[in-house]
Image: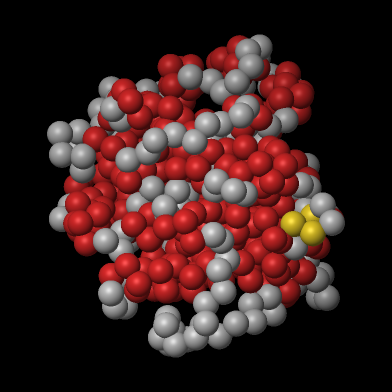
Amino acid sequence: MIRWLTILALTATLGGCSTEPESGGDAGSAVVVQAVAGELLAGSWPARMAHDDQRSRFESQDGWRHMFEYDLSLALVAFSVETDPRGLSRVHEQLAALYTQGAFLAANATVEAYGEGALETDPDEVVYLLGVSEFIRGDRDAALKHFSEVAPSSVFALRTGLWMGVLANPGMPSLEVLTSVSGTLGEVVPGQEPAALPVPHFELKEKSEKGRLMGANDPTALLTRAAWHRAAAVQAAPESDQAALGQFQLRYGLDRSRSSDEHAALELDDAWLFCSSNLSATDAAFVAEAMTQGISAVSKWADKSVLAAAVAPAIQDGKVDPQAVMDAGFGLQKQAQRMMADIAGAEAGFHRPFAQRARIAVLQAGMIVADANDQYRDAGILRLNALERMETVGVEPVFALSVAAWDAGNRSPLRPEEILHQFRSTYPALSAAKAPLEALHLRRSRNAGPANPVH
């Protein structure tokens, strides 16, 4: 209930969080205060891409144009192992993150609809769906409790036995284990996208006089698809880049155990950085540590990472100040625009969108640090502000799905439904999250009184 009330307050608060004008203007017409040290920013991908010779490799390949436009579906078929193995690996890594967040969205909606919002007429089989969902949410004890309540005669009995085996081992289940639960997606072949399973996966009978059938989808299917794409990313990436791939996968992964480790800054080809929320190679290492270490990671990386340096002044009295993060993001945008104009000798049309992505990256980094510092509301302000900023440069589907999952965890279904509607025609497998979201929406509506509207 506390988080639900928090999200309503955040939505109302967000509109007043941004105070600077959004109009462009001349990047050189005003004094630009340095948000980070110039030598740090010079090593970022926006600054380096201001050099024509550095940018040309991305301009000549359709796959990178689709990546810039956040269309992973088109980028997948535009790349190949022969022409750009790193680009192809990165697309698969992003698709793995997309379906991981789709699974998280389905899990949160399932728990809030059939756990917190349970009805006496719910089919007994929903305990299996709750078990899978709690595992995805990271609560193995709750998952074990739900799985132990699945009847031996249940349609989910076999799947439950396989999941009990998963719980007996640490870490995330392998692709082989997941396919034994939800069915195979076929041989892992980089450059391909397996066909989506038709929905609903199951029809369960409600415990009502009419015994109506309720469509239900197993979130395991989305986890399996994520694991398939993760395996494809590994196959496509050069052997020398496997460590980089593993580091990038931590940002949206469900298994945070590796985030507790120390991470070295790796030598990265620009294919891993261009258009990403990591502005430099050191940012990837910083983010990996910040997800669990929060503020301590900021102080450790502030002299090496662009994002850590930008966030560092926003750490005040042991907490992240969200307004200061937003100010830092705006400052970095202006500094980056000025630097790109200086490098190129004049302003160019791509400078502003590149700099805007740098600004969004700062908001996301501050959000990650605030989350790790247990500042739920402050992280929410930055999360929503980052999503709002994306409306000017294109909405990144992975981040948008992560916001939808966060919303569903707050029992707030409307924005997740809009986000899911926006992307599921391009990524049909995401339709598996639709049924629990609709159930959550319906149950919120039933419980909303005249003075308690559904937001």
Horizontal side of 15 relative to 120 (left or right) equals: left
Residue occupying the point 49% across, 70% down: 335
In this view, 227 is above or below 444: above
The quadrant where residue 36 appears: bottom right
Q: Is residue 433 left or right of residue 117?
A: left
| Along the viewing direction, whichever of 331 and 181 lies nearer the viewer | 331
x then y, percent, for residue 77 = 21, 45
Compared to residue 7, the image places residue 205 above or below, namely above
The answer to whether residue 110 is above or below residue 389 is: above
Q: Would you identify the image quadrant in which residue 52 lies?
A: bottom left
Residue 130 visible in image: no
Q: Specify whether residue 281 is in view.
A: yes
Residue 411 position, x and y percent, is: 71, 55
Total marks in image: 0
The percent position of residue 317, horizontal first and vertical second, equals 84, 56
In this figure, which colouring scheme has been used for the structure?
secondary structure
Q: Position of residue 359 (x, y in %)?
A: 52, 65
Looking at this view, is 401 or 133 the one in front? 401
Vertical relation: 316 (above or below) 234: below
Quadrant in which the C terminus is drawn? bottom right
Residue at figure coordinates x 36%, y 43% from the top left: 272
Q: Residue at x 25, y 54 (%)?
A: 54
Give the quadrant of the N terminus: bottom right
Task: Residue at 28% x, 27% y: name it.
Answer: 238
Question: In the depicted view, which residue is nearer to us: 219 or 310?
Answer: 310
